[in-house]
Image (cartoon, helix red, strand yellow):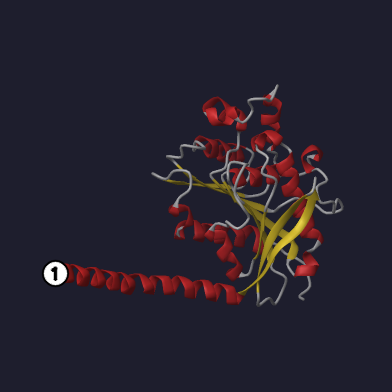
Amino acid sequence: MNNNLSLGRMVCVVALLGMVLVCPAFGQRASARNRFLNMVKVHKNLEYAKIDGQSLKLDLYLPKEMNNPPPLLVWIHGGGWISGTKKHVKRPVLKLVLEGYAIASIDYRLTNISSHPDQIHDCKGAIRWLRANAKTYGYDATRIGAGGGSAGGHLVLLLGLSHGNKTLEGTIGGNLDQSSTIQAMVDFYGPSDLTALWDQKQKLRERFENHPNPHPLLQSASPLTHLSNDDPPLLIFHGDQDPVVPVEQSKDLHKQYQQAHLQSTLHIFKGAGHGGKVFQSAIPSRMVKAFFDRYIKQIKTNEPAN
């Protein structure tokens, strides 16, 4: 009886200690989230296009205090082209709303890369919509950067490198009088050459089981196919132990950027795989901020204050 009572008391003490230790951390996270929400104006589920009955939406985050229209950063989520959501914005990008940026996170059709160019059409349609609606929401559409992770990184690269390509532009969402070009891009471990990845990854080949001739599609969907000497500055993050997208994909992209005398920075995390906490840490946060400050925020603009 006494042993059972003692055991019960021990359990209670451990539980109480756990609450004491955990609650301050939980409280700090909740407090940080509240501070963030108090400083940010959020517009959720703005429809930028409708295709075959499906509504394509984006979320928009703006600083509450704005002396001038802030530059815009667009986030494209990952998920292997078949999953994911606009709700998941990498911390190094989302926190920039507190540094004077507007952030838009977009959804796109999750129809697999074998449906190319559907998904890049969606992304370009979102950029055009964002430019067409800049004055309504108060950001500066003359300064737009983009970032994405994995499949989202691939779509960011394709968005940035295929500017001016009519086949990849599409007409999703209209606003065809607006440009879909971006001025800078951040890629978190996205594939840049799908033709090379085809030879290395069985999972990619499985996505084209019923496709009669996938190679022209893979070439069109490969950002490196579209590289030219007027492409925007690029910042790349990759893990050297990535089992999904080999780090050689980013190394080759960086090399070809340099050969074309374009601005590119490649940061490789030793021991990192495909994603993980290291990509949310202080190092990428500082680098992303410095990159967008240089290539987006410092662009001269004649946009008037609201």
User: Quick one: 202 or 92, which is closer to the camera?
Assistant: 202
Q: Residue visible at 70% across and 30% down? A: 217
User: Quick one: 71 or 2, which is closer to the camera?
Assistant: 2
Image quarter (top left, top right, bottom left or bottom right) of the C terminus: bottom right
Total labels drawn: 1
Element at badge 1? Answer: loop
What percent of the width, then of the height, locates residue 149? 57, 48
Judge from the rendering whether residue 50 lies leftward or rightward of residue 7; answer left or right: right
Relative to 272, residue 1 above or below: below
Image quarter (top left, top right, bottom left or bottom right) of the N terminus: bottom left
User: Quick one: 138 or 212, which is closer to the camera?
Assistant: 212
What percent of the width, then of the height, locates residue 256? 60, 36
Residue 152 visible in the shown view: yes
Residue that lies at the very extreme toward the front in this rendered image:
1
User: Amino acid type of disc 1?
Assistant: Met
Q: Residue visible at 64% across and 36% down? A: 224
- Characterize the local packing of mark 1: few (<14), some (14-19) or many (20 or more) Cα atoms within 10 angstroms: few
What percent of the width, then of the height, locates residue 148? 60, 50
Residue that lies at the very extreme toward the left in this rendered image:
2
What percent of the width, then of the height, locates residue 218? 66, 30
Residue 298 visible in the shown view: no
Q: Quadrant of residue 165?
A: top right
Relative to 133, residue 224 above or below: above
Residue that lies at the very extreme toward the right in this rendered image:
177
Q: Quadrant of residue 69?
A: bottom right
